[in-house]
Image (spheres, coloured by chain):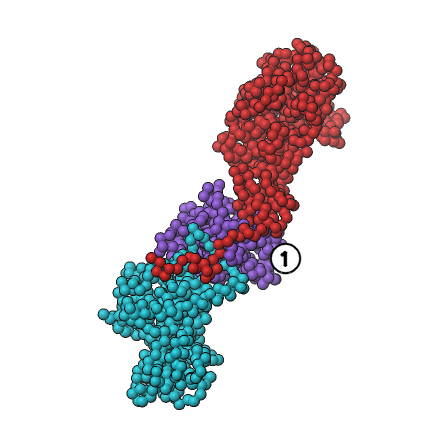
Chain colours: A purple, B cyan, C red
Amino acid sequence: MIASEEQQEYMRSGHMACPGCGEASTMRLVLKVLGEKTIVVIVPSCVGVISATFPNSTFKVPCFHSAFEIAAPTAAGIANALRVQGREDVTALAFAGDGGTFDIGLQSLSGAADRNDNFIYVCLDNEAYMNTGIQSSSSTPQGVWTMTTPGGRQGRKKKFMQIIAAHRMPYAATASIGHPHDLMAKIRKAKNIKGTKFIHTLTPCPTGWRMPENLSAKAAMLAVETKLFPLYEVIDGTEYRITHQPLGLPVQEFTKIQGRYRHFTEEDTAILQREVDDEWEQLVAKTKGCKL
Amino acid sequence: MKTLLQGNYAVAEAVRLARVQLVAAYPITPQTPIYEKLSDMENEGILPGVMMRTESEHSAMAACIAASLTGVRTFTATASQGLALMHEMLHFASGNRVPIVMCNVNRVVAVPWAFGSDQSDSLSQRDTGWLQFYCEDAQEALDTVIQAYRIAEQALLPVMVAIDGFFTSHFIEPIEIPDQASVDAFLPAFSIPTRFNEADPAYIANVVNPEQYMGYRQKSFEDMENTRPLIKEANEEYQRIIGRGYEAVESVNTDDADIVLVTSGAMTSTARVTIQSLREKGVKAGLLKMKLLRPFPTREVQEILKNTRKIAVLDRNISLGKGGIWCQELKAALYPLENRPIITGYIAGICGADVSPDMIEDMVVKALERERSDDLPIWVRRDQ
Amino acid sequence: MNGHGITIENIKKIVPFSQGSTEIFLTGLWSSRKPIHLDKTSPCRQACPVGNDISRAFYEASMGHYDEALRIFRQDNPLPGVCGRVCYHPCESQCNRKYYDEAVNIRGFERFLADNGKVDIGRERPALLRKEKVAIVGSGPAGLSAAYHLARLGFSVTILEALPMAGGMLRYGIPEYRLPKGILDKEISYIQELGVEIKTGVTVGKDLSLSETRKDYQAIFLAIGAHSGMQLGLEGEDLLGVMDGITYLRTINLGKKVRLGKKIAVIGGGNTAIDCARTARRLGAKDITVIYRRTRAEMPALAEDVDGLEREGIKIELLAAPKRLISENGKISGVECLRMKLGEADTTGRPSPFPVEGSEFIVPVDAMIAAIGQAPEAAFVKELGISISKNNVIQISSETTATSVDGVFAGGDGAGTKAFVADAIASGKLGALAVYCYFEGKDVKKELKNHQIGNQQSFSFQHFLNPKHYPVDLKKVVPYEKINTLCFPHGVRHNNPESVPPKEAVKTFREGTSGIEASRMPFEIYRCFKCGTCTHCDLCFLLCPDISIIKGTDGYTIKTDFCKGCGQCATTCPRNVIEMVEGPGGNT
């Protein structure tokens, strides 16, 4: 159920996201939970397009378009200023893409997480540089087609949550637009924890994933239900809890609807399936003995 | 009463007196003692604001920009590579019209790796939209930082205060630390409204079209021009309340001078001695100390130098392919004069290399002998 | 003090400070395809002869509104407590969930509601009473159903019942251990509370002629059932120890004793046969054999009842048919049977059995019960000139229940509809509609079509009374492929537990199964996909990237000015409520 104070919208219609954009829906839900006392930091990414050009805004809350690699220190600077001003009822929120998080913004995010500055960082991971036209990032899965990996990406997707957990920040979680209630519950939780909170959301991109625009939320659901993108949370970098038991569908249920996987052979898919299974087991192992 | 302090600590004292609410910093030689001193102050509970120990200068500036937009007074300090790393953020600060004050402790930029003083780091940031002040000594550094806040917050533009690495930053000098009440009388509490007001929400810094972009740039240019009276007024007010002041351009014995030596930063102190001794030897030499780089004090230098025939410019910096940066700036400023002077550019003291009074004397004398301006600078180095 | 006098207005002039709304951009123009929310029909509802709005009842129950869920069942079915026990649940055979894991226990749910929900007769009463009087002959499921629906339409209804108590086959044909009389009594009492008068012990055609009845009532619905057991057509059926199944059951249910001995053969594979065998077992027969001419797969009886039969130690002799009855001293002593083989499918779709020559064998018995079918006792209707078939079945138009005589309608077993309870109830419901149309001068076929569920005979009474109450496309049935199963975790079906162990069961007529536990019911309710019924789960609303679905108090509306037509809402809707349409699209 949606709490009554979350009925309000803090994003406006008429924004410039492509039809079926997973990022826009994620942002909308995050803002729904955080409410009007929120300052949004965005950085160059599709968000910069979605949010519209001067003199219009899709946001009903204050927002700042910061630079690519500094989503975290920007939010941190705001949070510390809010502390000085005694406005700690206001949440500093950063939205950054996978490029801005896994790649160019990793250092500054790490710094902010280390200081445990009081803000929420939401990574909108669409697994490539989509805003600039589908170039590979370190979040792009292995073998996947992008404009800069026409033969399939060699590198493997960075296990970002492990990097995050290593910072031992008070709260980190994965979330998906396909499971909106879970996502909102995590934002709700993050809102009430002091320190750096990191939410890794998978935000399917019909344009970049080469799939019909009606499939993005379904793709998000499939990523979760195939265990490819499990939903869990990590407290203090050590306590793991799986928040949604996946159906455990075969990974090709997820890959087959996307053109970026079109060239995958049966063997490629089998490799991916093994990897997904292994990682799931590792995740389950981490939850053992946790108090949650 | 004066206190013995190194220049870096003097800057830290200025930050404390300015009631800075947020400091974000990252260590780099030779700036580090500022960061350390501010940390001591925080530890002792005498720093009024919060410290952010960022993982880079880039993030330090990012945090300052964000905090300043939120509505608090901010400070950072850096040098050399750190300033170079910040470069993107310097544009970002001025574009966002945030009144950040930063101290840059001048140091060479690698490579080769070295640590000595060299203004190239900050001079090469002259087009990033910041006001830039160059200080001669620790006392001036302290006073300029406090003045900088007043100017920055009136103009909504960031200000950089540069001091020479190791010379000014590390030399221990007797410093007069103003009392808090006087500083408070000079510098009101930070009162720029927050850009992030949930009651009147706005999206800051989103994409604009070419016409709009150019409009904002022109406005920023005009506002930078409009800081000239603010700078003057701040100095006069400081003088009135605290009893010290510094002209944007200071002239010494220039009225009757056959030659004027132009300097900036710590070398000015050596030049003062040299000019004095040349006068004693019968050479009618004058001195022009450049404190302000941006906005460039064109009118002031034109007025002072309109009758001067010969000028020697001493640059502790180098723009490859052109020459000393102060020299270039000065040449451009004096170009409209009817009687354009003969200007000789010297490059000396790079990386804190020795620049002794006799070396300066030699430069002035030789410049006096020259009958035409030369494009290329003269490199002055002790024999190796 | 503002030291420098800088205001936010000053700042707005020097940096991009955007406070305009993006709602000036009508992104709805990007696409002409828009979503539309409209409830559809679940396959279980289509399969239900009564047309119960099953998915909506599950939805209400999922919110804890059990009384409302029961009310939804009672919109179409006055006997949910009966159907919740004895229905052959074609709904479950068509349940979409069966493709995912197991069909939902719909019958168990209906029983749960009937046993635990509160009936609000006040809400079922008609708004206006009509002056026309309708007589219903027979108080079985068809008659009760017709009476109930006619009463709800405001008619004054009288049921004329020949037997001492109302209920027809439900009371006299179904044993207590399957359908406790108390349940039936309760549901009949609700019908009476609606104003239906039931006169028992009145045999039309004997105590009162049909033509007299016709004068007193402006319409008649004949629901006389089929209470006459069919004969095997073998010599010796008048022997002592030979009985037909329906007579056997009726006699027991009338509280009379029947002595048959220890060894009994029951001929037939339908529910009556199974009921006879299990009743005889409870009454002390030790050695019972059910003889059926096809295989178990073709048995018309419910599989769970056949299972119960076997658990109770009753033998089944499949692919066998009686050829001759053997007697000793004027009393039956054995049944000579022939082995059968299955051949081509007959008109019912089941393979026809044919005898294997020379395969005779003898089953020694003390008694034999032939439960091979029942026929109506309809001769009395000829008085009015109503046509009946040679099997005594009243001839009607299956679409309108009209007999050959104006103002006289007929349904249920007596009019040849399928012999299951649910079909009888459906037939009574259709009869009520037909009577209503008769008085209103409306075309019943047209009405039926307007409110028809899917492609089946059943129609929605709720929709007929108030089509706008639950806006729904009755014709569009949700196929499994349109269910977004990603929204549903797998879950084990909750069956109705056995309430009596088999060893005890053979000694008692206590009900053999119990209801699903109240603490477990929500899990089974959760298992139901609720195909085609919007549960206001908010998924569409929450997923919309364009903030173009507005959540209202009772549904969703589309901001067509901004909807980019991506269709995510339609694709991800767990239960296929949303569709993308060309044009303005819009709202429920």
Would you say residue C126 is visible in this rendering? yes
Give me the residue at 59% from left, 55% from top.
A207
Residue nearest the observer in this picture, C7 or A221:
C7
Give me the residue at 35% from left, 58% from top.
C2
* Residue with the most extreme left position: B1
Q: Measured along the vertical axis of the image, is residue A146 above or below residue A91? A: below
Give residue C241's position: percent from left, percent from top.
66, 14
Left or right of C108, for residue B377: left
Residue nearest the observer in this picture, C497 or B153:
B153
According to the image, label 1 marks what residue?
A263
Give me the residue at 41% from left, 72% from top.
B294
Chain letter behind tag 1:
A
* Residue with the most extreme top position: C207
Q: Secondary structure at mark 1?
A: loop
Give residue C519's position: percent from left, percent from top.
48, 32
Residue C369: quarter of image = top right
